[in-house]
Image (cartoon, rainbow, N blue to C red):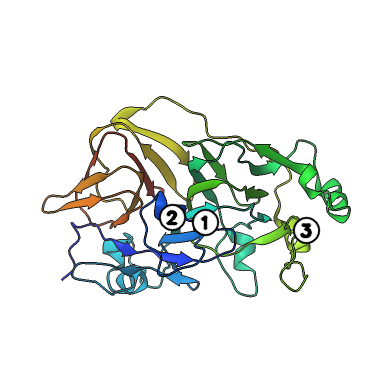
Amino acid sequence: MFLPDQPIRFEPIFRSYIWGGDRLASQLGKKPPGSGIWAESWEIVDHREGESIVGEGAFSGWTLRQLIESFPNEVIGRDTPNERFPLLLKYLDCQRVLSVQVHPDDVYGAKMPQPDSGKTEAWYVIDAEPDAKLYAGLKSGVDRQSLLAAIEKSETEDCLHVLSPKAGDCIFIPAGTVHALGAGLLVAEIQQASDCTFRLFDWDRVDKDGLPRQLHIEQALEVIDFERGPVEFVPRHEIALANARILVECDKFTLQEFACPGSTRLVDRQLAIITVPRGNAILKTSSHEFSLERGQTALVPFACPSVTLEVAEGTTVLVSTLPRTS
C-alpha cells in the first residue's frame, strides 16, 4: 500500500572526479562510499546515468523508476508510468574550474542519436572561496563568428562573462547558455534530468597521456543562444510571502529559498524536492514528522495532501517544484 502522505528519502549517488574535494563531507555531512575524491552527490535522479534508491521506510531499496512505474499518479501527478522523473538535484564540490560547456533545448535533445531532454538548470551557491569565479553567458557583442575565431586562437576565455559569487547567490542557466563553474565553489544544482553536454573549452588541460579531452565545437555552436549575452545573478529581494524567496520560475521548474525561522504550509498536491544545504528543518504531514539535517534531501510526492515546513534558526532550505499545469 502506497503511503501518499509521507515524504521519501533516497540514498545519494556519489560521483568521483579529479576536480572534487572534501566539502561534501565536511560542509554537507555526507558519507561518501570510500576514500578518494568525490565531486558530486546526486540527490534525486531518474536517468539512464543514475537511479535514486529509497533509503528507508516501506519501499526501502526501490528505485525512483520503480516507484513511478507503480504509482505514477501518486508520485508525479500524471498517469504516465513510462515518464521519466523530469528533474535532477545534485550537490557539486568544485576544487578545479570545470569545462566551458552548453546544453541543448528539448527540441535538439530529442533529435540526438541517443535522445535526451534539454537541460535548463540553476545554481545556488552554498560556499565560495574569496577568489572564486563562475562563467555565465557570453560577453556582449560575441556572436557565432567571433566565438569561433576565439576558439581557433585558444582565446575562448576572453569571450566569457565572469562573475564573483558569494554564499547565497543564485544564477539561472537556461538551455543554450555558455557556462562553467569555477574553482572554490560548493553549489546545489537543480536541472532537467538530462546528461546532454557539449564542451567548448577545457582550459587546455591534458590527461596523464598528454591528450586533451574531447570537445564538441560543432554541436555547441548549433545550440548556443547568441542573443542571450551576459547572465547575472538572480536579484536579491527581501523575503516575501510565506517566508520564501522565489529564486527561479521558468517552464521547467520553480526554485524557492526558505531562510527565515518559522513554519510554512507548502502548496498541497504538488511534487516537490526539498533539500537543506545549511542547518536543519522538519517536514510535517497529517500523520508523519520528517527531520532533514544539512545536506539531506526528500521528495514530497504529488499525492501528499498537506506538508508543513519548519525552518530552524540559521537554516537554508531549497524547494524545487514542477510548473503548475492548467
Location of residue 33 by image quarter: bottom left
For the residue marked with disc 1, what is the amino acid?
Gly
Does 21 appear above or below 116?
above
* Discs 3, 2 touching: Cβ within 8 Å: no
The tag earlier along the polypeptide, 3 or 2, is: 2
* x, y percent for residue 164: 61, 35
For the residue marked with disc 3, what is the amino acid?
Asp
Asked whether residue 32 appears in the rendered view, the answer is: yes
* Discs 1, 2 touching: Cβ within 8 Å: yes
Quadrant holding the N terminus: bottom left
Residue beneath the point at 18% across and 70% down: 58
Mark 3 neighbour class, 10 Å CA radius: few under 14, some 14 to 19, many 20 or more:
few
Label 1 belongs to which residue?
Answer: 21
Q: Which mark is residue 71?
A: none
Element marked by disc 2: helix
* x, y percent for residue 193: 49, 61
* x, y percent for residue 317: 34, 42
Q: Separation of disc 3 and disc 2 at Cα?
A: 27 Å
The tag earlier along the polypeptide, 1 or 3, is: 1
For the residue marked with disc 2, what is the amino acid?
Leu
Label 3 belongs to which residue?
Answer: 204
Does 6 appear above or below 57?
above
* Discs 1, 3 touching: Cβ within 8 Å: no
* x, y percent for residue 287: 10, 53
Element marked by disc 3: loop
Label 2 belongs to which residue?
Answer: 24
Q: Separation of disc 1 and disc 3 at Cα?
A: 21 Å
Q: Is residue 316 left or right of residue 90?
A: left
